[in-house]
Image (cartoon, rainbow, N blue to C red):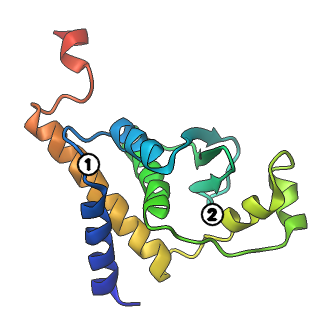
Amino acid sequence: MDYDAARSRAREAEASLRLSEPVSLASIQKHLELQRGRKIVIKPIEGATDKVCGLWFGLDHMDLIMHARAASEVHRQQIVLHEFAHMVLHHEQDIVSADYAGTFFPDLDPERVVRALKRTDFLNDVEVTAELLADRLAARIRNSRDRSGGQPGNFSSVFG
């Protein structure tokens, strides 16, 4: 594992996005939808195990991100940013059997489920680089909030 190379790839990938300020989870999603030419749908997974935090399925007509219920909005954001990072980095997903995949999501194409379910090793280059990019994107979101007075979204208009 070469952490310096992973950090460098994450830094280059973030720079290549050319995100406009202010940066938010919604603005990153919209940017990726424009870049990829299709909608990104984000949904919680009911009854997820502790091994599954988030899954990304690149379907023909959309990208589907499914995530475990998170303890906080910040944790949910990090899970989603990690899956966005896989998209940005063009990470291919390994393959397991289609029969195995069909038991999890019978309504989805088993080949696509297979690729997503295989990503559970968090100490490989692919996962580390995705997490480093997710961290960089989270920092961009925090910095945007700090510059705007630290109030996410529409807080001041709701609470005065």
Residue drawn at (38%, 43%) of the image: 31
The residue that mark 2 highlights is 51
Q: 44 left or right of 78?
A: right
Position in image of residue 73 (x %, y %):
40, 38
For the N terminus, give its image quadrant: bottom left
Position in image of residue 84 (x %, y %):
46, 54
- Between label 1 and label 2, give the one nearer the viewer: 1
Residue drawn at (15%, 46%) of the image: 143
Position in image of residue 156 (x %, y %):
18, 16
Q: 96 left or right of 102?
A: left
Residue drawn at (14%, 33%) of the image: 150
Task: Please say if 108 is above or below 9.
Answer: above
Q: Residues within 10 Å of mark 2 (few under 14, many from 20)?
A: few
Residue drawn at (27%, 70%) of the image: 12
For the C terminus, give its image quadrant: top left
Q: Quadrant of residue 95?
A: bottom right
The residue that mark 1 highlights is 19
The answer to which of 32 and 41 lies nearer the viewer is: 32
Query: Marks 2 and 1: in contact by CB < 8 Å?
Result: no
**Mark 1 or mark 2, earlier in chain:** 1
Q: Quadrant of residue 22?
A: top left
Classify mark 1: helix, strand or loop: loop
Q: Residues within 10 Å of mark 1 (few under 14, many from 20)?
A: some
Position in image of residue 45 (x %, y %):
66, 43
